Image: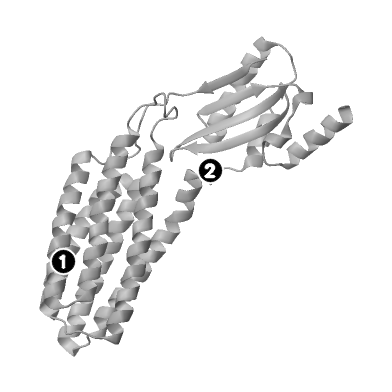
Amino acid sequence: MSNQHTHGGHGGHSHGEENLSDRQLIFAVAINVLLTLAQIVGGIVSGSLALIADALHNFSDAASLGLAWFARRIGRRPADRRMTFGYAQGEVVAALINLTTLLIIGFYLLVEAINRFADPQPIEGWTVIAVAGVALVIDLVTAFITHRGAKDSINMKAAFLHNVSDAMASVGVIVAGIMILLYDLYVADLVITVIIAAYVIWQGLSLMPRTVRLLMGAVPDDVELHEIMDELEAIDGVESIHHLHVWNLGEHRRALEVHIVPSSSSLERFEILKLAIRRRVSSQFGIEHATLEACLAENCKTNLIAVTVRDANCRESTKKGG
């Protein structure tokens, strides 16, 4: 019997595009770049580290949005001879880059805040409040734009989290400016900087594990491998299964590869069995790409994959049969 391969098309598609256009993303990038320049100038003039921290975070917002836009364009490309699964994984790579920049910025701000504690600087409160107020409005507008695509894309969610944290940072900077004006409490600027940095680091660490798992081909988070094995072995015509792999193609599409020992040696019956398996994994686990290989029980090569309980049982039965 030969390998059976069933799957949907590999054309490029970026989830969330129906809610967020490229033009909106480009607009968000442009206003965030302009805001970054204004915040840097305001931070230098006022002497506020928190404002400069907000500017750096905002620059990462602009970069993350630009990267998100680029990744979406790449992700739309159809499969070709080199990228046979398509380019959807590019959005996950973009998310990893965005999250990494969040962590770098967060740790940098912590170091700068510690240095400022040792060498305090005078700060102009009104300049801080004015610039941070403008930043807050732009951050909220940008967060609203990116939120429309964040529900269906980890790439856009990473960009959205950039914007939300920057809006919170702007609120913190305004509070610091008020404290400086009312009480000459210059340490408030440094405290707000530390809070911004801690939140930025928490954001990066919260999404990083899932992003790495997607890139490493891990089993999808909401799928249990043993449940798939039980479902497949419960299908009439399946004697046993082994060499089972399940992974994501990009963020939303899933693939499966499995060796099947069918009850019948008829190729025609295996074709019918293949269709039944395809329907089952699609309806139960959302798997649209299935590679099914029919084989004989004595050819069960469990050393091709990390051993599971069923692989071990299959190996024992093979040894006894020999």
Quadrant of res 60: bottom left
What is the image's colouring?
Answer: one colour
Q: Position of residue 265 (x, y in %)?
A: 74, 14
Residue neighbourhood size for the residue with mark 2, other residues' Cα within 10 Å, grouped as few (<14), some (14–19), many (≥20) = many
Q: Quadrant of the C terminus?
A: top right
Q: Residue at x 21, y 65 (%)?
A: 55
Quadrant of res 134: bottom left
Q: Which disc number belongs to residue 131?
A: none
75 on left or right of 294: left
Circle 1 residue: 39
Q: Position of residue 160 (x, y in %)?
A: 31, 53
* SS at circle 1: helix
Looking at the image, tell me whether mark 1 or mark 2 is earlier in sequence order.
1
| Type of the residue with mark 1 | Gln
Q: Residue at x 62, y 14 (%)?
A: 271
Residue 166 lies, with reference to residue 28, above or below; the image says below
Residue 36 appears in view: yes
Q: Residue at x 44, y 27 (%)?
A: 84
| Type of the residue with mark 2 | Pro
Spatial CA span between label 1 and label 2:
41 Å
* SS at circle 2: loop
Residue 17 appears in view: no
Q: Quadrant of the N terminus?
A: top right
Q: Residue at x 88, y 31 (%)?
A: 320
Residue 181 lies, with reference to residue 256, above or below; the image says below
Circle 2 residue: 220
- In front of the other: 245 or 175: 245
**Labelled pair 1, 2 in contact (Cβ < 8 Å):** no
100 on left or right of 313: left
Q: Position of residue 272 (x, y in %)?
A: 63, 15
